[in-house]
Image: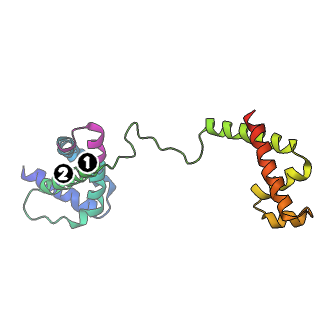
């Protein structure tokens, strides 16, 4: 029993120096016990495995903090595993989902393929309807509603009074509505 304690203390000290072989040996010696602790807290094998992995990352990063004081080094290792599992459990209860949780879907921003197809079809219909307008009326509608030109700018460009431009645009929109609903 004393030799196990001393062996684990020696391994932790070597891990603190960055010894990967010692870390692998430590993992082989204590992973079953730490997995059991994580499984007892979390109750599902997958989350317990994740918590155990997180625990070993913490052990690797913090092994220089361990101080051999005659008590069991397993107590220190088990405390890390238990606290990591409890942290994971708390995060789950607060509504955080693990990225590895089956069924968690990450939706891509923007339209889905069906929405893209419908939008492309509507755009093609709208272009056809715009092309059916008289050339100057179609250009005025495009300028006002697609390019953001002001009514005054359009009236000046087409050399017509402002109220005439407003009438062109209103009638153009009515024609587009009729064309799109057909």
Q: Quick one: quadrant of the C terminus? A: top right
**Picture layout, residue 133 above or below residue 14:** above
Q: Name the residue nearer the viewer: 113 or 104.
A: 113
Q: Which residue is mark 2?
A: 82
- Percent coordinates x, y for residue 45 in the rendering: 26, 37
Determine the residue positioned at 7% across, 53% down: 2
- Dot in front, 1 or 2: 1
Q: Name the residue nearer the viewer: 21 or 125.
A: 125
Determine the residue positioned at 19% across, 64% down: 66
Q: Secondary structure at mark 1?
A: helix
Q: Is residue 131 left or right of residue 124?
A: right
Q: Is residue 72 left or right of residue 57?
A: left
As measured in the structure, the alpha-carbon distance from the residue carrying label 1 to the one carrying label 2 is 16 Å
**Picture layout, residue 142 above or below residue 115:** below
Quarter of the view holding residue 169: bottom right
Tell me where the magenta segment starts and ends, as one range: 41-51
- Percent coordinates x, y for residue 63 in the rendering: 24, 62
Q: Which mark is residue 6?
A: none
Which of the two labelled residues, at mark 1 and mark 2, occupies the earlier sequence position?
2
- Percent coordinates x, y for residue 74 in the rendering: 14, 53
Q: Is residue 47 on the magenta stretch? A: yes
Q: Which mark is residue 93?
A: 1
Q: Secondary structure at mark 2?
A: helix
């Amino acid at each position: 029993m004393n030799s196990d304690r001393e062996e684990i203390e020696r391994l932790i000290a070597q891990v603190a120096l960055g010894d990967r072989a010692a870390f692998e040996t430590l993992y082989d010696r204590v992973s079953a016990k730490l997995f059991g602790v994580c499984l007892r807290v979390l109750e599902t094998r997958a989350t317990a495995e994740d918590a155990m992995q997180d625990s070993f990352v913490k052990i690797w990063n913090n092994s220089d903090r361990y101080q051999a004081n005659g008590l069991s080094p397993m107590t220190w290792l088990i405390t890390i595993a238990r606290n990591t599992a409890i942290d994971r459990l708390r995060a789950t209860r607060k509504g955080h989902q693990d990225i590895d949780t089956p069924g968690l879907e990450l939706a891509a921003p923007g339209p889905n393929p069906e929405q893209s197809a419908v939008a492309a079809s509507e755009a093609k219909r709208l272009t056809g309807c715009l092309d059916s307008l008289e050339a100057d009326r179609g250009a005025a509608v495009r300028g006002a509603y697609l390019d953001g030109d002001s009514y005054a700018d359009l009236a000046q460009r087409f050399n017509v009074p402002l109220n005439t431009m407003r009438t062109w645009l209103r009638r153009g929109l009515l024609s587009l509505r009729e064309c799109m609903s057909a």
